Image (cartoon, rainbow, N blue to C red):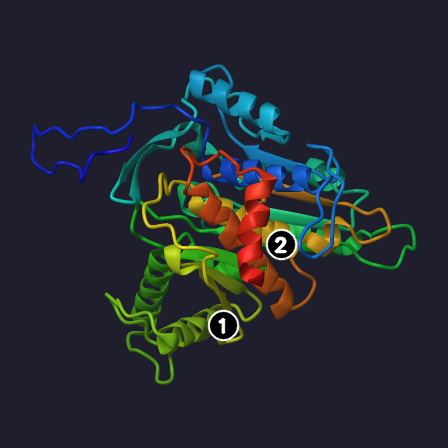
Amino acid sequence: CHLDGSLSSEAGGDTRLVHPITTMAGGSGLNTCTHLCSLMMAATTTTTPSSKSSTYSGGGEGGVSLYTAVNESDPYGTLVCNHAKQHGFDLHNCHPDASNKSTGHCAVLVANGERSFLTHLGVMETFEAKDIDTSQLLSRASSSRQLYVHVAGYYNIPGFWNGQLKTTLQTIRTAMDHQQGGGDGKKKKKLVTSLLCQYDATEAWDGQLMNLLPLVDYLFCNEVEVQKIAQATKSRQAQQSEQQQQGETMITDGQEDYDESYWTDMATFFCQQSPSTCVIVTLGPKGALALHGGQIMTRQEAPTSVENPLDPTGAGDAFISGFLYGLGLDDHDNGDGDTSTTTITDNTSSSNGGLPIKESVSQALRYGCVVGTSCISKMGASNPAPRGEIEELMKKYAS
């Protein structure tokens, strides 16, 4: 719903819509899969700025899969399933017997360049991490040396909270540690895990996310979400210890001037929680930055300024697809015929086998900012840009 101005706050009031209401396939995981597939498909015939290209054949081994929960017989579920087929990724319905619940859906309100959501979780309310068939997930990557697992929308999936997702990720990591990649029987497979927290409608900002972070290589948040997570965590820790410990980092409430010292404090806080996790913070028109090791690892401005974005919905999901694509460019085409498999759990795959490399993260941030920027110039969150548009935006970093 695109509003003409702000939403009326007066009871019984009315607000005009600029465009007709449109129903589109969406959801964080689906959006990321759609943009990522578009990038990978285009790379089969186009040389990227890093002179790398990749072979992509849609879903299956070396492809992209979405593990989610839908009611396949209702209109929303049908829309989602058809969208996945159209855009070339596999959709695995982890809750096929949920015919008594609706597929999750939301109303998106867009006004003055911002968006808000009215969400009905539906079947997602009973989707649990244990519903994911990890043996099937791992078998899909049996001939690949890389498995990227991205978890989309953590705070919208109660069945992933409080250690449930942690158990699943531990199972995947243990299995990958014991599998050997390629034909030499020596090199272990590479697992990369990432997670998008998404806004917590309960305002608790917990779900034991901090306990999960050691199993997450890349945590994605926007500047509002990262602050709320830090504030809520510090508050709980202070209550548990009954007093603030000396030397702990404090995150100021209501911070508006996000200067370098603010982000350094934020980096220190997350490093105290999980030293191995790289926190990626999206900053809207200001680009994005990466926090790791208690410091700002790198930051990236947006490729161009968009004064009047047509639709900001899904820009963060699009950013993640670009980031994962840029991060895995060397893995997509490493010269020995290997492929990488990406799995996304909705509302997908990476434990990096080593510390984040600044050059790789910088490249990933550039791709993320480019794909995110392209997204806001189009209607709908799952409407990928043509390859030519992505290349033109990437060229702006070279000029």
Image side of residue 92 versus residue 201, left or right: right
Q: Residue at x 42, y 72 (%)?
A: 269
Q: Amino acid at mark 1?
A: Cys
Image side of residue 5 versus residue 141, left or right: left
- Can residue 71 be seen by looking at this rendering? no
Q: Position of residue 319 (x, y in %)?
A: 50, 49
Q: Position of residue 223 (x, y in %)?
A: 36, 59
8 shown above or below 293: above
Whichever of labels 2 and 1 marks the residue nearer the N terminus, that label is 1
- Considering every residue shown, the one lying at the far bottom of the view is 246
150 shown above or below 66: below
Image side of residue 195 versus residue 261, left or right: right
Q: Nearer the viewer, residue 265 or 86?
A: 86
For label 2, count other residues whose C-alpha is less than 10 Å away and answer few (under 14), some (14-19) or many (20+).
Answer: many
Say which element carries label 2: helix
263 shown above or below 106: below
Split into 4 quadrants, where in the image is the C terminus? Answer: bottom right
Q: Nearer the viewer, residue 329 or 52?
A: 52
- Can residue 89 be seen by looking at this rendering? yes
Q: Position of residue 144 (x, y in %)?
A: 78, 46
Q: Nearer the viewer, residue 160 or 47?
A: 47
What residue is shown with label 1?
271
Say which element carries label 1: helix
Q: Quadrant of residue 283?
A: bottom left
- Considering every residue shown, the one lying at the far front of the view is 399
Q: Amino acid at mark 2?
A: Gly
What residue is shown with label 2?
326
Q: Residue at x 45, y 16 (%)?
A: 74
Q: Quadrant of residue 190?
A: bottom right
